Amino acid sequence: MEHHVRTRCGSVSVIVYGDQDKPALITYPDLALNYMSCFQGLFFCPEAASLLLHNFCIYHISPPGHELGAAQICPSTSSYSADDLADQILEVLNFFRLGAVMCMGVTAGAYILTLFAIKYRERVLGLILVSPLCKAPSWTEWFYNKVMSNLLYFYGMCGLLKEILLQRYFSKEVRGNAEVPESDIVQACRRLLDERYGSNVMRFLQAINRRPDLTSGLKRLRCRTLIFVGDSSPFHSEALYMTSKLDRRFSALVEVQACGSMVTEEQPHAMLIPMEYFFMRYGLYRPCPLSDSPRSPLSPSCISPELLSPESMGLKLKPIKTRVSLEV
């Protein structure tokens, strides 16, 4: 069911799946995406869906103007900052009368949720971050973002802009080349990008390009944090940096081989077992017995022993490096 929640920064779309008596898991997508284009692969994966929907009611929050069928935001509407978007999440939680929630975000969405967790620590149970950002933009990222802003301003969601975004999201293995066609997930994402209004995307991009550095606040986080990143992601080094700044008692890193930024779409099975052990700390579990699924690139033998230790399952999550091969 879709709800439109009125906030200080305008209306925001929230898609609610599941029993609202269950603990809440909120999601926040990357730039120019919404829940369909950013989390569909994960929630359509049967094993992951059973784990998440068995334990949580899902609240998919879209950035302003990014929901399915979104109208163009009025040009006279004031621009917003990353802080405004974090505060908007608080208003959504208050609207649904939610207490502390589990959070899952991808890249720009991961940044917004991390900022929310720093500002409102008592409202966050845990963070699942996919290819996250935490620093202010580097000169390279700032330049790319300015190029995208100019393309959006003059040409809207043009072909060149979509190519830049697809490189941001996906590894070259699924983007295809002259000999190999694009994968289905890339083609589907390309079609969904056609539905976005360039001016709406530009507002989110400008907020992210003006984002403050969160490094000093990371050590103050006391919620557990599970970070996924593809080793082909443009934000791979950013994820490693963020992991190094988090409290090692409460954080873990999972690297996924031959994968871009959107692990949720490109290799959702790679998230399954790490999430299972992460949720065990909260007394949550998958309803069916754990088995080595032939559809999953992960099996217990592929997981770092540190993640499987009683310490990480109970009292601590250590920073780890898990590599997943496509051939498995």
Image (cartoon, grey):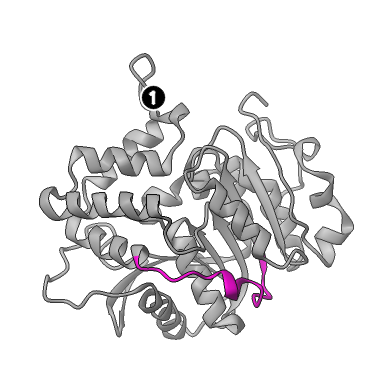
Viewer-closest of 134 and 305: 134
Rendering coords of residue 255 (x, y %): 64, 44
Magenta segment: 210-225
Q: Is residue 62 left or right of residue 119?
A: left
User: Please, what is the dominant secondary structure of the magenta stretch?
Assistant: loop
Picture quarter with the C terminus:
top right
- Category of crowding for the residue at label 1, using alpha-carbon neighbours closer than 10 angstroms: few (below 14), some (14–19), many (at least 20): few
Q: Is residue 307 above or below residue 103?
A: above
Q: Residue at x 22, y 58 (%)?
A: 69
- Farthest-out residue, top: 179
Q: Residue furthest right?
A: 310
On the image, which quarter does residue 188 sit in? top left
Measured from the top left, where is residue 37 in percent x and y? 37, 48
Q: Quadrant of residue 247?
A: bottom right
Residue 221 in the magenta stretch? The answer is: yes
Residue sitting at x 76%, y 42%: 303
Q: Position of residue 33 (x, y in %)?
A: 34, 53
**For the residue labelled by badge 1, is the local secondary structure a helix, a strand or a loop?**
loop
Relative depth, front residue between 171 and 49: 171
Q: Residue at x 36, y 78 (%)?
A: 84
Image position of 100 (left or right of 198): right
Q: Which residue was labeled with disc 1? A: 176
Left or right for 127, reference 308 = left
User: Along the line of sight, which residue is nearer the eye, 46 or 38?
Assistant: 38
The image quarter containing residue 89 is: bottom left
Residue 19 position in % (x across, y down): 53, 69
Residue 274 located within the stretch drawn in magenta: no
Residue 10 visible from this viewpoint: yes
Q: From this view, report whether residue 134 is shown above or below residue 101.
A: above
Q: Amino acid at mark 1?
A: Gly
